[in-house]
Image (cartoon, rainbow, N blue to C red):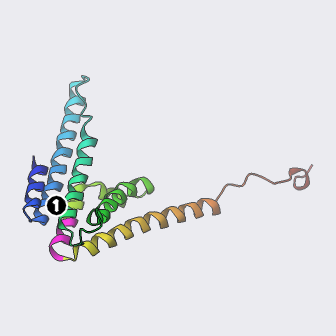
Amino acid sequence: MIGLLGGGVGWLGNYALGFLLLGVGWLIERVASLLAQVERDSLLASGFARRSAHVFHWLIDAGFIILATWRSELPQSPWGLPAFAPILLIFALRLLPLALPDSRWPHWFEDRIVVGFGLALSSAFLPFDSTICLAVIALIGTCLLSLQSAQNERRFHAPSKGSPNPQLTTRG
């Protein structure tokens, strides 16, 4: 319900509040999911597991994309141009924890209230389209650099497989 309210407020032109309400809607769903899990665990019964949480998270992300598209000041002439950077932003936010699973900071970007707050601030105080584009470049660049350094580290510290010719290098 809060997410729909955020979409309505954004449609009426108050984008910053719309982004915040979408983030709060995500937070309310997470709290409800955690409470339902605690209840299922305490009852020692199978209970109903909420399988629709992932669908709800994708709907929140779609709400962010739609609000960011409405907020965009880019021309509408090539169809889909204002939606391109917001779509890339959401995909990059979903890619970050997968690309860097051992790091702790990418999991902050799984919190959609943090994303909503950041989008609200950039909508209110910064050039919105430029901020979205720079955020996409920063997120994808961070993923690429971290994955490249991890690959180089594995290559540099690869365990030795022994001598290539043990007959010449071992003592009898």
Please indicate, yes or no, whether residue 161 appears anywhere in the rendered image.
Answer: yes
Number of numbered discs on residues? 1
Give the image quarter of residue 99. bottom left
Q: Residue at x 28, y 42 (%)?
A: 54
Can residue 93 be found in the magenta stretch?
A: no
Give residue 133's position: percent from left, percent from top: 32, 71
- Look at mark 1 in the image and give the residue it sits on: 19
Q: Residue at x 10, y 60 (%)?
A: 11
Q: Residue at x 26, y 69 (%)?
A: 77
Give residue 95's position: percent from left, percent from top: 39, 56
Give residue 52's position: percent from left, percent from top: 24, 37
Location of residue 82 with respect to 58 vertically, above or below: below
Say whether residue 109 is left or right of residue 97: left
For the residue marked with disc 1, what is the amino acid? Phe
Location of residue 116 with respect to 128 vertically, above or below: above
Q: Which residues are magenta?
A: 119-125
